[in-house]
Amino acid sequence: MTVQTDMTADIGEILLTEEEIAAKVAELGSQIGADYADRRLTLVSVLKGSLPFMADLMRAIPVPVRIDLMEVSSYGGTTTESSGLVRILKDLSATIEGEEVLIVEDIIDTGLTLNYLVRYLRGKNPRSLRICTLLDKPARRLVDIPVDYVGFTIPDQFVVGYGLDYGEYYRNLRFVGVLRPEVYTGVG
């Protein structure tokens, strides 16, 4: 992969603008705040992709929140396909036993990683465990997972930006865009 100085040159189409994302995050924050109006909430971010979403979402939730971070991997290097093998690279730093927990994801694709994570976190005995994702890609789903809060349902395209990467690049784009296939296939 050749990294462009102007990363936008690798984007074929802007799927979600910065403004659309901000409006949806505010909407999700209000909805979550209403649902947890009389309770404290622990947000668990799945690194690295969900970090921008979590940072914006936690500021949009008007109830007391604490955050924790996990890092899991089911992709290898610059591949665009999940390996199906899930590894925990960084576990929670605090207990979630008896807590209201909301997993914050950037994107749900096949659902394999999230399915593993949900089973793992349920084993830590939270009071409740729900899921919030910015992007849902149901066309690729291999595991049925109930998602409580969905920002956008997107088509089966390879997207980057707003935390989503290819080869660890493009995360800092303020929008979600479709990566041109020749960037990740080397053809073209």
Image: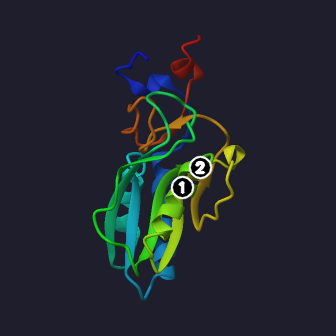
Residue on which the image places disc 2: 112
Count of labels in the image: 2
Q: Nearer the viewer, residue 115 or 171?
A: 115
Residue that lies at the very extreme toward the bottom in this rendered image: 38
Residue that lies at the very extreme toward the left in this rendered image: 93
Q: Nearer the viewer, residue 45 or 10?
A: 45
* Marks 1 and 2, how far apart at CA: 6 Å
Instruction: Confirm whether residue 130 shows in the render.
Output: yes
Q: Residue at x 42, y 89 (%)?
A: 38
Q: Residue at x 52, y 62 (%)?
A: 118
Contact between labelled residues 2 and 1, with CB atoms less than 8 Å apart: yes
Instruction: State the image coordinates of residue 12 (x, y, percent, origin top left).
Output: 56, 27
Residue that lies at the very extreme toward the right in this rendered image: 139
Asked if 58 appears above or below 165 in the picture, the reply is below
- Residue 116 - label: 1
Q: Residue at x 49, y 74 (%)?
A: 32
